[in-house]
Image (cartoon, rainbow, N blue to C red):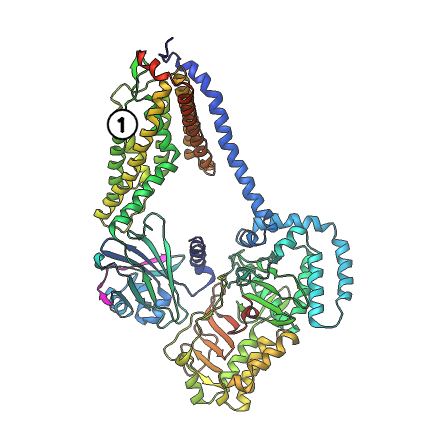
C-alpha cells in the first residue's frame, strides 16, 4: 500500500509537472463504486485526445467539447464487463477544464451492475492510446463501498498503456463486511481520537453528581444513566454527521476542530465547577452536534448515493457508540469505586485540570496555522497513560481495601 | 469516619492548582514538536548513513535549498582540503594513467570519492543490490534522484566528478554530456525556471567502483540519464536517456552547442537512404508517438516488458537492405554506442550490427507525414528495434523554446539493461 501511495505521489508530481516539463500528459480515470453502480470521472488531456480524435482540436476554441462526438468515440474505446456480460456505460455532461495551463476534457460516466453476482468488473479501455502509442492512463479507485477504500483515500488500480488495456475492478464482497469495515473504522476513530475521549471522560466524571450551591455533590453514578448520556452525545453527532454528508455544506473544518476543542475545554471546566445547570443529556446532545461535524471529515463519501452514505454514516456511528458503551462499562465502576474514597475530588480535579490543559493546547494548535505541526499523538499518549494509571489505581484500590464495600454501604451520599 | 467528600474548592483556588499543570503540559506538547522537527531534520541530513533512506531525502531535488544547506556543510568541511585536493588531483591524474580503461575509471572514481566528506560519500554510494536505486532516473526536472547534486559540490569535487565522466565516456560522449548540461543552463538563462540547470544534475555510484567487481555509474538530470553498469569489467550503458531543448544550436558562455545533432541527423540519414517503397514500409501507419514508448523506469526496480512483439514489430527489416543502407543503420547506432570507450562499445556494436542481429532488426518511423521525415514537426518519431537494441527518438513541441521542437531519445538493451543485474 505504501509503495502504491508513493507511486501515486510520483504520478501526481508527474501530472503537476507535466505542464511545464513534459508535453505528453497522461489521462486519469477516477472510479467510485456504490452498491449497484460504478461511476467514472475521465480526465483526458485535450492535445493528446485531438491526435486520436482530430475534431477535438476545435473544442479549445469552442470552450466546450462536442458531447455527441465525444460519447460516440468513448463508446468505441471503453467497455465494462461483468461475468462476460457488457454493462451499459452512460456518459454524463462533459466539460473542458484548464489545469496547469493545459486543457483537459472531463467526462463523468456511470454504469449499473448486479451486486448480487459478486463478480469482478473488467474495464477495457484504449481511449487515446489506440492512436497515441505511448499514452498512459492512471486508474484510481477514489471510493469503493465494497472494499472499504471509502475511508482510506484513493487506491491505484493500474496504469493503462501500450499492451495493457484492461483493468480489473476487484470482486465485490457482501454488504455485511462492508458495513463491518465502517463499523470498525468508527471504533478506531473514537479510540484514537483523544479529544473525543477527553470529552467522554468529562461527561462520565460528573455523571451522577448533583449541583448544590454551585458545587458538585457526590452521588454514585449509574451505568444506565451514563449509557443514556453517551447515547445522547451519539444522537447529536449522528444528526450533524448525516446532515453534513447528505447536504454538503461548505464548512471550514479548522474551525470545527477548534469548536470541538472548545467543547472539551468547557466540559472540563464543568467537571471542576458546574457550568451548566440544565439536563446533562441536552448538553451532551448539543456538544454531539459539534463533534458530528468533525466526524464527517473522517469518512469520504463523494460519489456515493444518499442511501449508501446514510448506511455508511450509521455503521460508522454504531462503531463509535459501541466503543462509548464499552468505555462506560469500564470507567463507571472505576469512577464509583473512586467516589467512595476521599481522593475522588482530588482525582476529579486533577483529571479535569489535565483535560483543561490539553484542550487549551488543542484550541491554540487548531487556531494557529503556525502551530500546525505540534504533535497531537503526544497528547493522545498522555491521555491514554493517565487512563491506564487510573485503571491501575482502581485495581489497587480494590485489592487493598477488601472491606470497602461494607464501609460504603454505611455511608450516606451527600 | 466519613468518606463523603464535598467539592470545597473555589474556582480561584482551582485555577491556581491548574495553572502549573497547564503550563507543564503545554510546554511538553510544544517541546515535543521541536523534538520532532529536530528528528526530521537529522533524518534528512543523517540519512546518509542509511543508504536506502537517503534516496528520497537527498534526492528531493525540488527543494534545492535544503539540499544545498545539507551538502554545503559537507563542502565546508572539505573546503579546508581544497588546496590539498587540487594537488591531489594532479597526482591522482598522474596515478590514473595506468593501463586499462577500467583501471583508469576506478582510479578516477576513487579520486572523486577522496574529495568528499564522509556524509557525501555515504550519499554517493548505494548498495549494488539496490534495484530501486538502479532504476531511479527520469526525464523530468524536479523529481527525486540518486546521489550528490552537482550544484552542491565544490569546484574541486565537481572537477573530480567530471574527470570520472571524462574517462567513462569517449570525447564524443563527453561532448554530449557538456552540451546537454549547457542546454539546461540555457533554459534557465532564458527564463525556464530554477528546476532546470546543470546544478540540478546528480552523480551516484551503485556499488563500490571496482575493476573486477560489479558496480554502476549514474550521472543525469532532466534531459540526461547515463546508467553504466560494469559487470566484471564489461560495461552496459543502458538504459540511456538523452534529450535536448533547444534542438537547434545555441550559444551560452561564448560556446556553441548542438549536442544531439549527430544522433538526429544519423537517424534521418538512415531513413533517407531508403527507397520509396522501403520508406512506405517503414512508416508506422495509424500510430502516433508524443514521447518515447519505453521511457524512464522511475525507480520501479524492474525491466520494461512492453516492447512490441510478433506482428507489432513493424518497419523495414535491416537485413533486406543493401550494404550501403545497412552502413547507415550501423552509423546511427554508433552515434549512441560510440559515446563509450572500447570496453563498453565494442561488444555492443558487434552484437547489434551482426548479420544475425540485422536479420531481426526493424527500423520504423511515425509522424504527421508519411512521405518525409521532418524533425521540426511535432510527433516525428524514429526507432531501431533489434533483438536486443531498442533506440527511439521523438520530436516534441518545445516547452520553453516554443518555436521549435526538441528531442527525447532512449537507448535500451532488451537483454542487458542495467547489465541484467536487477
Name the image quarter holding the C terminus of chain B.
Answer: bottom right
Nearer to me, B395 or B338: B338
Outermost residue to the top: B1
Q: Is residue B278 above or below residue A47?
A: below
Q: Going by the image, does A233 lie left or right of B418?
A: left
| Observer-nearest of A351 and A359 | A351
> Which image quarter: residue A47?
bottom left
Q: Residue at x 67, y 59 (%)?
A: B158
Residue at 48% across / 87% down in the picture? B274
Residue B3 location, x and y as percent? 37, 12
* Membership of A412 in magenta stretch: no
Residue segment shown in magenta: A84-98
Relative image position of residue B83 (x, y in whole percent): 77, 54
Q: Which of the two residues, B131 or B400, is positioned nearer the viewer here? A: B131
Under circle 1, the secondary element is helix
For residue B71, say whether it is visible.
yes
Task: Tell me if residue A100 comes above or below residue A268 in the rendering.
Answer: below
In the figure, residue B367 lies in which quadrant? Answer: bottom left
Q: Position of residue A255 (x, y in %)?
A: 36, 35
- State the predominant SS element of the stretch in magenta: strand
Amino acid at each position: 500500500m505504501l509503495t502504491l501511495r508513493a507511486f501515486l505521489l510520483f504520478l501526481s508530481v508527474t501530472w503537476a509537472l507535466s505542464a511545464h516539463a513534459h508535453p505528453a500528459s497522461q489521462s486519469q480515470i477516477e472510479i467510485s463504486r456504490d452498491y449497484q453502480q460504478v461511476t467514472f470521472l475521465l480526465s483526458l488531456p485535450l492535445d493528446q485526445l485531438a491526435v486520436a480524435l482530430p475534431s477535438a482540436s476545435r473544442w479549445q476554441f469552442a470552450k466546450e467539447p462536442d458531447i455527441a462526438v465525444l460519447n460516440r468515440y468513448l463508446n468505441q474505446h471503453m467497455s465494462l464487463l461483468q461475468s462476460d456480460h457488457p454493462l451499459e456505460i452512460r456518459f454524463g455532461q462533459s466539460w473542458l477544464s484548464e489545469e496547469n495551463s493545459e486543457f483537459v476534457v472531463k467526462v463523468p460516466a456511470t454504469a449499473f451492475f448486479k451486486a448480487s453476482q459478486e463478480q469482478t468488473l473488467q474495464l477495457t479501455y484504449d481511449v487515446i492510446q489506440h492512436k497515441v502509442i505511448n499514452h498512459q492512463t492512471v486508474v484510481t479507485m477514489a471510493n469503493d463501498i465494497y472494499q472499504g477504500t471509502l475511508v482510506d483515500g484513493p487506491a491505484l488500480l493500474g496504469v493503462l498503456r501500450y499492451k495493457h488495456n484492461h483493468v480489473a475492478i476487484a470482486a465485490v464482497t457482501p454488504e455485511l463486511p462492508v458495513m463491518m469495515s465502517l463499523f470498525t473504522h468508527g471504533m478506531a476513530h473514537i479510540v484514537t481520537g483523544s479529544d473525543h475521549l477527553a470529552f467522554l471522560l468529562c461527561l462520565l466524571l460528573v455523571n451522577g453528581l448533583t449541583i448544590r450551591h454551585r458545587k458538585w455533590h457526590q452521588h454514585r453514578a449509574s451505568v444506565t444513566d451514563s449509557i443514556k448520556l453517551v447515547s445522547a452525545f451519539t444522537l447529536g453527532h449522528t444528526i450533524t454527521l448525516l446532515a453534513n454528508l447528505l447536504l454538503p455544506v461548505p464548512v471550514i473544518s479548522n474551525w470545527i476542530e477548534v469548536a470541538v476543542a472548545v467543547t472539551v475545554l468547557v466540559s472540563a471546566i464543568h467537571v471542576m465547577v458546574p457550568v451548566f445547570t440544565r439536563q446533562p443529556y441536552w448538553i451532551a446532545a448539543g456538544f454531539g452536534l459539534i463533534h458530528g461535524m468533525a466526524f464527517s471529515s473522517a469518512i469520504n463519501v463523494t460519489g456515493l448515493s444518499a442511501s449508501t452514505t446514510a448506511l455508511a454514516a450509521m455503521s460508522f456511528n454504531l462503531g463509535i457508540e459501541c466503543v462509548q458503551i464499552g468505555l462506560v462499562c469500564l470507567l463507571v465502576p472505576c469512577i464509583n469505586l473512586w467516589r467512595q474514597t476521599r481522593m475522588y475530588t482530588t482525582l476529579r480535579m486533577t483529571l479535569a485540570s489535565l483535560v483543561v490543559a490539553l484542550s487549551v493546547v488543542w484550541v491554540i494548535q487548531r487556531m494557529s496555522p503556525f502551530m500546525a505541526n505540534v504533535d497531537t499523538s503526544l497528547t493522545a499518549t498522555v491521555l491514554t497513560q493517565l487512563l491506564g494509571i487510573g485503571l491501575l489505581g482502581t485495581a489497587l484500590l480494590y485489592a487493598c481495601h477488601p472491606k470497602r464495600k461494607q464501609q460504603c454501604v454505611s455511608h450516606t451520599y451527600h | 469516619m466519613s468518606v463523603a467528600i464535598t467539592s470545597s474548592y473555589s474556582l480561584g483556588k482551582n485555577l491556581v492548582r491548574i495553572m502549573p499543570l497547564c503550563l507543564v503540559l503545554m510546554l511538553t506538547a510544544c517541546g515535543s514538536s521541536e523534538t520532532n522537527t529536530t528528528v526530521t531534520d537529522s533524518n534528512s541530513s543523517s540519512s546518509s548513513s542509511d543508504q536506502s533512506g537517503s534516496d528520497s531525502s537527498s534526492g528531493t531535488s525540488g527543494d534545492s535549498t535544503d539540499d544545498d544547506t545539507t551538502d554545503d556543510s559537507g563542502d565546508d568541511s572539505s573546503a579546508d582540503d581544497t588546496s590539498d585536493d587540487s594537488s591531489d588531483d594532479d597526482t591522482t591524474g598522474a596515478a590514473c594513467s595506468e593501463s586499462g580503461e577500467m583501471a583508469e575509471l576506478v582510479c578516477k572514481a576513487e579520486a572523486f570519492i577522496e574529495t568528499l566528506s564522509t556524509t557525501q560519500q555515504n550519499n554517493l554510494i548505494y548498495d549494488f543490490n539496490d534495484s530501486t536505486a538502479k532504476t531511479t532516473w527520469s526525464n523530468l526536472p524536479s523529481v527525486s534522484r540518486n546521489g550528490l547534486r552537482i550544484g552542491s559540490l565544490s569546484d574541486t569535487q565537481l572537477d573530480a566528478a567530471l574527470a570520472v565522466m571524462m574517462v567513462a565516456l569517449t570525447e564524443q560522449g563527453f561532448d554530449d554530456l557538456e552540451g546537454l548540461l549547457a542546454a539546461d543552463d540555457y533554459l534557465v538563462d532564458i527564463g525556464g525556471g530554477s528546476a532546470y540547470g546543470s546544478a540540478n544534475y546528480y552523480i551516484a555510484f551503485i556499488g563500490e567502483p571496482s575493476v573486477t567487481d560489479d558496480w554502476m555509474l549514474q550521472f543525469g538530470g532532466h534531459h540526461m540519464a547515463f546508467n553504466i553498469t560494469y559487470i566484471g569489467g564489461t560495461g552496459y550503458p543502458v538504459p540511456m536517456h538523452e534529450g535536448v531543448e533547444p534542438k537547434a544550436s545555441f550559444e551560452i558562455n561564448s560556446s556553441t552547442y548542438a549536442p544531439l545533432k549527430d544522433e538526429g541527423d544519423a537517424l534521418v540519414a538512415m531513413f533517407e537512404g531508403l527507397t520509396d517503397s522501403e520508406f512506405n514500409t517503414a512508416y508506422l501507419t495509424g500510430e502516433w508517438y508524443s514521447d518515447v514508448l519505453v521511457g524512464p523506469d522511475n525507480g520501479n526496480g524492474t525491466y520494461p516488458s512492453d516492447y512490441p512483439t510478433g506482428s507489432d514489430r513493424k518497419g523495414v527489416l535491416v537485413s533486406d537492405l543493401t550494404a550501403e543502407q545497412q552502413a547507415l543503420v550501423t552509423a546511427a547506432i554508433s552515434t549512441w554506442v560510440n559515446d563509450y570507450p572500447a570496453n563498453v562499445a565494442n561488444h555492443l556494436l558487434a552484437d547489434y550490427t551482426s548479420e544475425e542481429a540485422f536479420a531481426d532488426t526493424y527500423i520504423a518511423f511515425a509522424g504527421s507525414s508519411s512521405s518525409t521525415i521532418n524533425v521540426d514537426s511535432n510527433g516525428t518519431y524514429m526507432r531501431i528495434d533489434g533483438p536486443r537494441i531498442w533506440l527511439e527518438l521523438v520530436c516534441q513541441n518545445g516547452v520553453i523554446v516554443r518555436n521549435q521542437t526538441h528531442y527525447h531519445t532512449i537507448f535500451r538493451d532488451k537483454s542487458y539493461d542495467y547489465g541484467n543485474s536487477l
